[in-house]
Amino acid sequence: MTAAMSTSSLTIRPVADGEEGDVIALWRACGLTRPWNEPARDLAFAAAKFNSEVLVGLADGRIVASAMVGHDGHRGAMYYVSVAPAERGRGYGRAIVAAAEGWLLERGVWKVNLLVRAENTAVLSFYDGLGYAPGATMEIEKWIDPSKRGDR
Ligand SMILES: CC(C)(COP(=O)(O)OP(=O)(O)OC[C@H]1O[C@@H](n2cnc3c(N)ncnc32)[C@H](O)[C@@H]1OP(=O)(O)O)[C@@H](O)C(=O)NCCC(=O)NCCS
C-alpha cells in the first residue's frame, strides 16, 4: 500500500503516530488481545519493520477496522483482523483483509498462511467467503523466549 486507499466508505492506511491507543482499544473490543501478547509491544514491533505493517480503516475519521500484516520472506500472515462491533456487516472486514492482501501482493508475496484460534470457529465462515480454506499443514510451535511464554 503506497498511500491511503478508500473502499466502501472505509479509508485504509498504515497506523499513524498517536493512534496506538485507539487501535489497541479496537483490538480489545474485538476480543483479540491475550495477556502474553502485550498489544502495545506487538503494534510497535510490527509498525517499525519493513516486512510488516499495522493497517487501520477509518470511517468518518474514526478507526473502526484494523489488520496487522507481514511476511517472513516467504509467506504472508495477518493478525488482529478486527472491525468494531457496532460497525460490522458493512464490508469493512472484507475491505481490510483485501487491503492486507494488496500490501502483500505489492511485495511479491503470493500466499497467506492465516492462524485462527481453535475457539474462534465463528470467524471461519467469514474467511471462507473471502476464499480462505483449511490447508494441508499443521501448526507446531515453540516459545523460543520462555520469558514471554503464554497459554494457548
Ligand atoms: C471477522 C470480522 C473482522 C468481520 O468483519 P465485518 O466487517 O463484519 O465483515 P464484512 O461485513 O466485511 O463481511 C464480509 C462477508 O463475510 C460475512 N461474515 C462476516 N462475519 C461473519 C461471520 N461471523 N460468520 C459468517 N459470515 C460472516 C458477511 O456476511 C459478508 O458476506 P457477503 O460479502 O457475502 O455479504 C469481525 O466480525 C470481527 O472483528 N470479529 C472479531 C475479531 C476476530 O475474530 N477476528 C479474526 C481473528 S482470526
Image: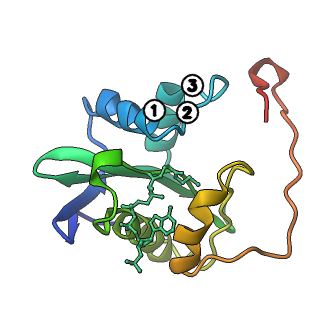
Q: Earlier in the sequence, mark 3 or mark 2?
A: 2
Secondary structure of residue under mark 3: loop
Residue at image point 52% right, 27% down: 41
Residue type at mark 3?
Glu
Q: Position of residue 107 (x, y in %)?
A: 49, 71
Q: Residue furthest left?
A: 60
Q: Position of residue 63 (x, y in %)?
A: 25, 44
Q: Position of residue 56 (x, y in %)?
A: 32, 50
Locate the C terminus by quadrant.
Answer: top right
- Which mark is nearer the camera, 3 or 2? 2
Q: Position of residue 113 (x, y in %)?
A: 68, 66
> With 45 as the anchor, is 34 left or right in this view?
right
Residue at image point 89% right, 51% down: 140
Which residue in the structure is indicated by mark 3? 38
Which residue in the structure is indicated by mark 1? 28
The reply to whether the C-beta atoms of the residues labelled 3 and 2 are less than 8 Å apart is no
Q: Nearer the viewer, residue 116 or 126?
A: 126
Q: Is residue 55 visible?
A: no
Q: Is residue 131 visible?
A: yes
Q: Quadrant of residue 109?
A: bottom right
Secondary structure of residue under mark 1: helix
> With 55 as the anchor, is 129 left or right in this view?
right
Image disc number at residue 33: 2
The reply to whether the C-beta atoms of the residues labelled 1 and 2 are less than 8 Å apart is yes
Locate the N terminus by quadrant.
Answer: bottom left
Q: Quadrant of residue 89?
A: bottom left
